[in-house]
Image: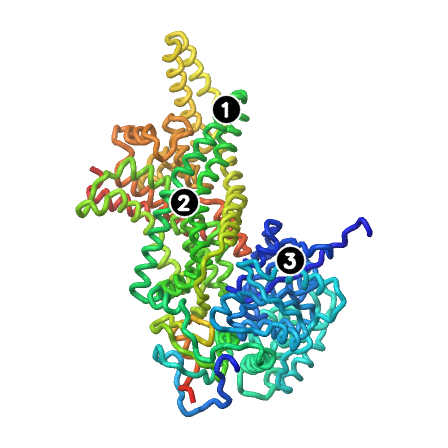
């Protein structure tokens, strides 16, 4: 049993950005874009392809549940994360 | 055995933030812990002794919490340097004690995946096992230990469980001869690994000129962290061609994907493999109790209202609880001063001891209750996890000023005392944000301004109820004075971020820890250390400058004045006896003190600047008092007391002083003090940098003299302009009566 639910394949069909994701809907991380400090930090914190997430608080800053973590980041910064629906 | 004890081994304690690292450190080291500074750095050095029983003791270094060895903030860079044994002033580390949160194992293991690459003896403390169990998470610690090749000890630092086994295992790690280094480490894609290996063969000159080979860990960081701390440091040592070399190496990996993506995926793959079946937990995204609480507390409207209410409650508690304590301290020092005054002979020494030293020390310690209580609340709110939510709520507003939610705690702390507040800005990663926060922190109305407000509001603002008794005019003016600092700080921070400290708004990324009941021990130790920092750092500087000011107010000692009053004393002794004589002599002494201070260096300076302060509505006496309060603003009250011949032991509640202020007049008979004058004085004190301790702290935290000078200049300028506008405007509005 692995955490967090990680899927073997990442799907390119439903691109979406974390910044436009609706609260409450479970999604899956596709990739973190770029090499900015924020991007590197996000990867260290477990925002990597295949990880399931859910937005707990909308607005800005938004609160994202990544497995056991609750991460807080601004809406515009969340556009560094490409996400999609679980498959 | 031998009578000599070998030097204690050094162990570094490291882990993610919010994993109970501080609780563990306190539990292991108790009161033996010592907090200081790494020389030349602004980062705290926390070390304590851990007794391991018959094997001996070790020195445990508490490193700042970090998620990864890719260091960004000064805190993190220092942690990495200590671990890599890069600091000349820190002994090489004999073992690493890593603390992980059992309820969030995968993310905590990211740091472990880096620690195993260091090749040092490693021990993992698996903390918060009670929380994990409650959430239905079961961990096979033995299996984990076997796969890793390092010991894994389950503990609960708060319940103090497993600590004996931890100490025992630590002793075996250091003094035993079993293999203690990790048996497995992450594997990176071959192309990346080749570049790391190539770079790791590089010779690099050290700070002292000697050559050393780059370690693979550093090489990886240099390649992956573009423009990161390792690259910057190596560019300094190897010259600007190094950056080009790095770029070539990065391109040679041959992928368009960011290197940090390759690294993190490799690490998480390793983590999955190591943890494997050793972790049983529900697979769904779980909802915790903290999430339910957060639905309310982080709600934009309700959450903000609750936040404001908590702030109001905290400040109310401070004023209610601190009052009696402050009076006790005041009385105590008054007694000590009286006693010293009685046994010392007349002369400069007595004045120095009573007015300078005892007055100075007492003046600092009287603020301790307020500061301790505010820090108690801050520690409580931080330990239970609420502070992260407050930073979240404040981020919106702070972003408009060019800052971020992380500036919230330093600015809040500055309402007690800017010294610890500015020190706590170390957690802000971005240099420009950190400096901006430090530069506006002194505008937050600190405890020392309060006596000034109380004196003038109490004496000159009518106690009038407004809006049907709900508000009070005096309270409103007090609130106004507090707000002025904030209202000025907002555009100032915005301007600084647009001009001198220009830069992109750094991203705001923060973990929201689960709510938990604060641990009393941690809280008390935090308050003790913050209070200690205030007393030693602020206190010593305030004392030094108070003594300097005392000298300026004492010398030159005008013989003419003394002779003059001597004649009066002789006359009084002829005219009066007993009680009446005592009273008369008292009055004569006070008037002599007033004239002497006018003749001193300070007094002369006050007279000299009078033309400059006249537009603010001030006379020379207010000028003198304000000059005297530049090292420590609360001094104005006792100086006013002296100038008005009441003796130096007046305080802000003193009715004698209030009466004297009312009676004070210009040569032409006009009263000196009216509402506009009083408002302009308070505005000046709200905005001016009258605290040598704060300026000294700014110098320390920014490592330069430029910034404290800049702070002094801008705040004094703002204060003058503010006081000028206040006076002129309110006089024009006819408030002068």
- Mark 2 — residue? B447
Judge depth for marks 3 and 1 and give the one in front: 3
Q: Chain of mark 1?
A: B
Q: Chain of mark 2?
A: B
Q: Which one is in front, B607 or B302?
A: B302
Q: CA distance from mark 2 to mark 1?
A: 29 Å
Q: Which mark is residue B60?
A: 3
Residue at disc 1, secondary structure: helix
Give the answer, above or below, for where B376 lies relative to B222.
above
The disc, 3 or 2, on the residue closer to the chain's N-terminal end is 3
Label 3: chain letter: B
Give the residue at the far left of this rendering: B468
Q: Is residue B571 left or right of residue B273?
A: left
* Residue position marked by numbered label 1 in the rendering: B341
Residue shown at the point (63%, 58%) measured from the top left: B61
Q: Position of residue A37 (x, y in %)?
A: 50, 74
Q: Secondary structure under badge 2?
A: loop
Residue B565 percent across, percent down from the top left? 42, 17
Closer-to-camera residue (B689/B177): B177
From the viewer's perspective, is B471 left or right of B191?
Answer: left
Q: Does label 1 lie on the same chain as label 3?
A: yes
In the depicted structure, whether residue B237 falls above or below residue B527: below
């Amino acid at each position: 049993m692995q955490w967090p639910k990680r899927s073997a394949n990442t799907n390119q069909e439903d691109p979406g950005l974390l910044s436009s994701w609706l609260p409450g809907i479970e999604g899956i991380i596709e990739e973190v874009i770029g090499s900015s400090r924020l991007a590197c930090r996000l990867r260290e914190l477990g925002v990597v392809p295949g990880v399931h997430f859910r937005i707990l608080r909308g607005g800005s800053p938004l609160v994202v549940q990544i497995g056991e973590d609750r991460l807080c980041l601004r809406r515009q910064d969340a556009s560094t994360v490409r996400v999609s629906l679980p498959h | 055995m031998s009578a000599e004890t070998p030097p204690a081994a050094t162990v570094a304690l490291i882990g993610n933030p919010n994993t109970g690292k501080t609780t563990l450190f306190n539990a292991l080291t108790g009161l033996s812990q010592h907090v200081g500074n790494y020389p030349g750095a602004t980062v705290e050095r926390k070390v304590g002794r851990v007794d391991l029983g018959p094997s001996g003791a070790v020195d445990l270094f508490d490193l700042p919490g970090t998620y990864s060895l890719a260091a960004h903030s000064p805190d993190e860079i220092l942690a990495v340097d200590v671990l890599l044994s890069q600091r000349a002033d820190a002994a090489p580390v004999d073992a690493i004690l890593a603390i992980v949160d059992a309820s969030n194992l995968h993310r905590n293991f990211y740091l472990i995946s880096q620690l195993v690459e260091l090749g040092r003896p490693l021990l993992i403390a698996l903390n918060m096992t009670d929380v994990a169990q409650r959430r239905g998470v079961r961990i096979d610690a033995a299996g984990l230990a076997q796969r890793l090749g390092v010991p894994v000890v389950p503990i609960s630092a708060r319940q103090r469980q497993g600590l004996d086994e931890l100490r025992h295992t630590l002793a075996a790690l250091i003094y035993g001869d079993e293999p203690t280094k990790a048996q497995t480490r992450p594997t990176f894609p071959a192309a990346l690994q080749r570049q790391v290996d190539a770079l790791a063969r590089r010779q690099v000159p050290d700070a002292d000129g000697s050559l050393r080979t780059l370690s693979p860990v550093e090489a990886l960081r240099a390649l992956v962290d573009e423009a990161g701390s390792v690259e910057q440091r190596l560019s300094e040592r190897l010259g600007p061609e190094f950056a080009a070399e790095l770029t070539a190496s990065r391109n040679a990996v041959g992928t368009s994907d960011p290197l940090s993506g390759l690294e993190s995926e490799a690490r998480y793959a390793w983590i999955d493999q190591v943890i494997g079946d050793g972790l049983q937990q529900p697979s769904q995204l779980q909802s915790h109790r903290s999430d339910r609480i957060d639905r309310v507390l982080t709600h934009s409207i309700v959450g903000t209202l609750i936040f404001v209410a908590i702030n109001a409650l905290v400040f109310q508690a401070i004023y209610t609880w601190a009052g009696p304590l402050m009076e006790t301290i005041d009385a105590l020092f008054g007694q000590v001063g009286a006693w010293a005054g009685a046994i010392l002979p007349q002369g400069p020494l007595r004045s120095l001891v009573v007015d300078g030293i005892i007055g100075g020390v007492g003046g600092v310690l009287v603020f301790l209750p307020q500061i301790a209580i505010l820090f108690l609340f801050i520690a409580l709110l931080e330990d239970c996890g609420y502070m992260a939510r407050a930073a979240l709520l404040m981020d919106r507003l702070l972003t408009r000023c060019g800052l971020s939610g992380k500036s919230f705690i330093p600015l809040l702390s500055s309402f007690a005392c800017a010294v610890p507040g500015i020190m706590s800005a170390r957690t802000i990663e971005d240099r420009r944000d950190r400096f901006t926060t430090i530069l506006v922190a002194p505008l937050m109305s600190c405890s020392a301004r309060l006596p000034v407000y109380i004196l003038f509001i109490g004496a000159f603002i009518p106690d009038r109820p407004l809006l049907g008794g709900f508000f009070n005019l005096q309270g409103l003016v007090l609130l106004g004075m507090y707000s002025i600092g904030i209202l000025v700080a907002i555009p100032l921070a915005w301007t600084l971020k647009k001009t001198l400290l220009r830069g992109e708004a750094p991203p705001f990324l923060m973990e929201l820890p689960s709510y938990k009941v604060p641990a009393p021990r941690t809280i008390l130790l935090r308050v003790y250390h913050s209070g200690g920092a205030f007393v030693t750092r602020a206190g010593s500087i305030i004392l030094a400058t108070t003594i300097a000011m005392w000298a300026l107010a004492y010398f030159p000692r005008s013989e003419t004045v003394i002779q003059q009053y001597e004649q009066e004393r002789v006359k009084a002794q002829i005219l009066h006896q007993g009680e009446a004589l005592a009273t008369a002599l008292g009055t004569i002494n006070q008037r002599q003190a007033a004239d002497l201070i006018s003749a001193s260096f300070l007094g002369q300076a006050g007279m000299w600047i009078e033309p400059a302060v006249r537009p603010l509505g001030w006379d020379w006496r207010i000028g003198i008092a304000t000059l005297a309060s530049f090292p420590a603003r609360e001094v104005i009250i006792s100086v006013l007391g002296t100038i008005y011949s009441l003796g130096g032991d007046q305080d802000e509640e003193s009715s004698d002083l209030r009466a004297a202020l009312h009676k004070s007049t210009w040569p032409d008979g006009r009263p000196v003090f009216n509402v506009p004058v009083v408002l302009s004085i308070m505005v000046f004190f709200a905005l001016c940098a009258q605290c040598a301790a704060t300026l000294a702290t700014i110098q320390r935290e920014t490592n330069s003299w430029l910034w404290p000078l800049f702070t002094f200049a801008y705040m004094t300028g703002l204060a003058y302009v503010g006081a000028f506008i206040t006076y002129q405007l309110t006089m024009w509005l006819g408030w002068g009566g």
